[in-house]
Amino acid sequence: MVIDALTYYPTIRKSFHKPETEPPVSYGFAGLRYFLMLFAVPDPTWENLLYPFFLMITDWGFAVFIIVRRAQLGLSLTEYSKKSV
């Protein structure tokens, strides 16, 4: 889980400066995927649920980060730029 958290660093850094380049909807759907995965685990122990829960919270948290950052900069909350970095 530490490595997964560290892989977000470049994306967070880029999104802090250019939040219009990341679509928050895709992270919202990814979080929804992990939320639904929690119900599909055949043996629901905390060890089995911890990783999908971590991914769900990470994706939803990042989507909220993008939305808040766009609001701070006065950018559109629904559009995103497909320009390369």
Image: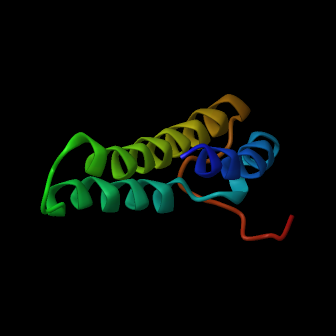
Name the residue furthest right: 85
Residue shown at 49% from the left, 62% from the top: 26
Q: How many marks?
A: 0
Q: Is residue 34 above or below residue 16?
A: below
Examine the image and state in which quarter residue 62 appears: top right
In this view, the residue in front, 76 or 70, is 70
Q: Position of residue 54 (x, y in %)?
A: 42, 43
Quarter of the image that includes the C terminus = bottom right
Q: How is the image coloured?
A: rainbow
Q: Image check: 33 left or right of 70? A: left
Q: Position of residue 51 (x, y in %)?
A: 39, 49
Q: Position of residue 11 (x, y in %)?
A: 72, 52
Residue shown at 66% from the left, 35% from the top: 69
Residue shown at 39% from the left, 61% from the top: 29
In this view, the residue in front, 45 or 73, is 45
Q: Image check: 1 left or right of 40? A: right
In this view, the residue in front, 71 or 29, is 29
Q: Image check: 20 left or right of 27? A: right
Q: Image check: 6 left or right of 44? A: right
Examine the image and state in which quarter residue 75 appears: top right
Q: Is residue 71 above or below residue 2?
A: above
Residue shown at 15% from the left, 50% from the top: 44
Name the residue furthest top: 72
In this view, the residue in front, 55 or 65, is 55
